[in-house]
Image (cartoon, grey):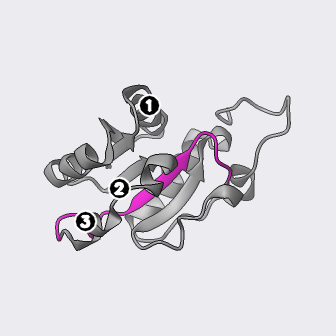
Amino acid sequence: MRAVCIARHHFLSEHIGAIFRDAGLECEPVVGFRDGVAAARSLAPDVVICDYDLLAAAPLGEWESDSALADVPIIAVSLTRRPDEAHLLDRRGIAGFLYLPTLDGSQASRMVRAVARGGGVSAPREALRWREPGVGSMRGD
């Protein structure tokens, strides 16, 4: 399964790519939404994984009106915003939101594959809240 991982800067796009590579995806890290659109057009990914903060200001109308991209689901991800702080799920084109600090590789893989099949994101409750101090690592290992 192929994913384009879009973020505001190289370090973050590489980090998001590494998380989802560990989950078994073939990932192409990209910086900026415009370059992400170009990468998605050329790579025809199964899913796009995009930093929430970048996606909040992204011109999604261009994405939705492009016949090559309209059916590619976009997953918003964040390392800092918790699910109760995310307000993108009511926007067209956003298939779901993942809070990365509490997500392990198998959960990430299941969720992305469900989105790619059109099933939407159904995150386990523990993936949708902050872990208590001393309970697992930040990546959920």
Q: Residues within 10 Å of mark 2 (few under 14, many from 20)?
A: many
114, 18: nearer the viewer? 18
Q: Position of residue 54 (x, y in %)?
A: 44, 48
59, 42: nearer the viewer? 59
Q: Is residue 71 visible?
A: no
Quadrant of the rendering where the C terminus is positioned: top right
Marker disc for residue 62: 3
Between circles 3 and 2, the one closer to the viewer is 3
Q: Magenta span has 73? A: yes
Earlier residue among tags 1 and 2 = 1
- The residue to which callout 2 is attached is 47
**Mark pair 1, 3: CA separation:** 27 Å
Earlier residue among tags 1 and 3 = 1
Amino acid type at mark 2: Val
Query: Which residue is situated farthest in the top direction here?
Result: 11
Q: Secondary structure at mark 3?
A: helix
Q: Is residue 84 visible?
A: yes
Q: Position of residue 120 (x, y in %)?
A: 50, 68
**Mark pair 1, 2: CA separation:** 15 Å
**Magenta residue span:** 67-82
Q: Residues within 10 Å of mark 3 (few under 14, many from 20)?
A: few
Amino acid type at mark 3: Glu
Q: Secondary structure at mark 2?
A: strand
Amino acid type at mark 1: Ala
Q: Position of residue 4 (x, y in %)?
A: 31, 45
Q: Magenta span has 24? A: no
Answer yes or no: do the residues labelled 1 and 2 have beta carbons within 8 Å?
A: no
